[in-house]
Image (cartoon, coloured by chain):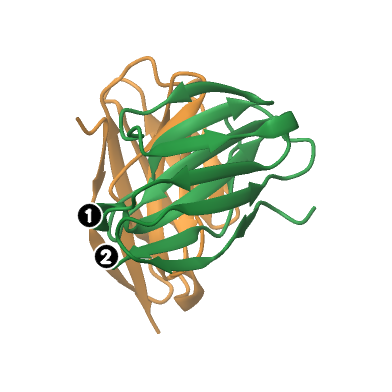
Amino acid sequence: QQQVKQSPQSLIVQKGGISIINCAYENTAFDYFPWYQQFPGKGPALLIAIRPDVSEKKEGRFTISFNKSAKQFSLHIMDSQPGDSATYFCASNQGAQKLVFGQGTRLTINP
Amino acid sequence: DTGVSQNPRHKITKRGQNVTFRCDPISEHNRLYWYRQTLGQGPEFLTYFQNEAQLEKSRLLSDRFSAERPKGSFSTLEIQRTEQGDSAMYLCASSMDVNTIYFGEGSWLTVV
C-alpha cells in the first residue's frame, strides 16, 4: 500500500522556468516531509524538508508548500537550471525510524 | 565528514550465491538504515539500527537477508542464496536524529 503518491512521473521544463512536483500522503500521523534529489548512479541527497507546523519553507531556489488539510505538499524549483535535471523523491516519516518514499519524478530542464 | 560509505559499489553474482555489502556511516551517527531501490522506484525501507540494536525489519526482508551492526559502528547486509529478484541498489543511510537521514552512494547488485 503506497502511502505517499507523487506526480507527475516525469516533467520537462525550460531553463529559467518553475518546476513543480506534487505529493499527497495518507497518514495524518506523518510529521516530517523531506524532498530528496537523486542523480543517476548516486544515492538520494536531502534537498529540503518541512514540518506541518508551517505552510511554506524556502531555501534558495527551492520551496516546499504544505497543505495540512489537503494532506498535500509540493516542491517548487524557481529559475530551473539544467543542473537541476535529476529524479526527485518526496517522503514522509512512518513511525520514528523510517521514511516512506514517493515513486519519484524525473525532471529534465531544457537549456 | 566523509559521508556514508558503501562497498562494493557494484556486485554481479550468480543465482544461489551469497553476497555481503558493507556500510560505514557518518561518524557519531547512532542510527543506521538499509533501503532497497529498484529502477524507476523510490527507496524501500529494509531495516533500522540504533547503535548495535536492530530495532525494526521490513516484511521485505526475507529470511535470506540478514543485517548486523557490531559495536554500533559499520553494518553489513548479507543476502543468502540470491535470486534474480534481489537485483537492486542497496542503500545505506545514517542519521543523528530521527529525521535528517543521509544516504550513501549505494551498492548495485545484479544476480544473473
For mark 2, name the chain.
A
Q: A61 or A3: nearer the eye?
A: A3
- The N terminus of chain A sits in image quarter: top left
Disc 2, disc 1: CB below 8 Å? yes
- Tell me the residue at 33%/65% (across/down): B14
Circle 1 SS class: loop
Q: Residue type at mark 2: give it.
A: Leu
Q: B50 or B1: nearer the eye?
A: B50
Color used for chain A? orange
Q: Residue type at mark 1: give it.
A: Pro
Q: B3 or B14: nearer the eye?
A: B14
Residue A53 pos. (x, y %): 50, 20
Snapshot quadrant of residue A3: top left
Tag 2 and tag 1 share a subunit: yes
Circle 2 SS class: strand
Color used for chain B? green
Q: Which residue is mark 1?
A: A8
Relative horizontal placement of residue B107, taking residue A74 as reference (left or right): right
- The C terminus of chain A sits in image quarter: bottom left
Q: CA distance from mark 2 to mark 1?
A: 7 Å
Q: Which residue is mark 2?
A: A11
For mark 1, name the chain.
A
Q: In the picture shown, does residue A90 fall above or below A108?
A: above
- Tell me the residue at 33%/52% (across/down): B82
- Tell me the residue at 76%/56% (across/down): B2
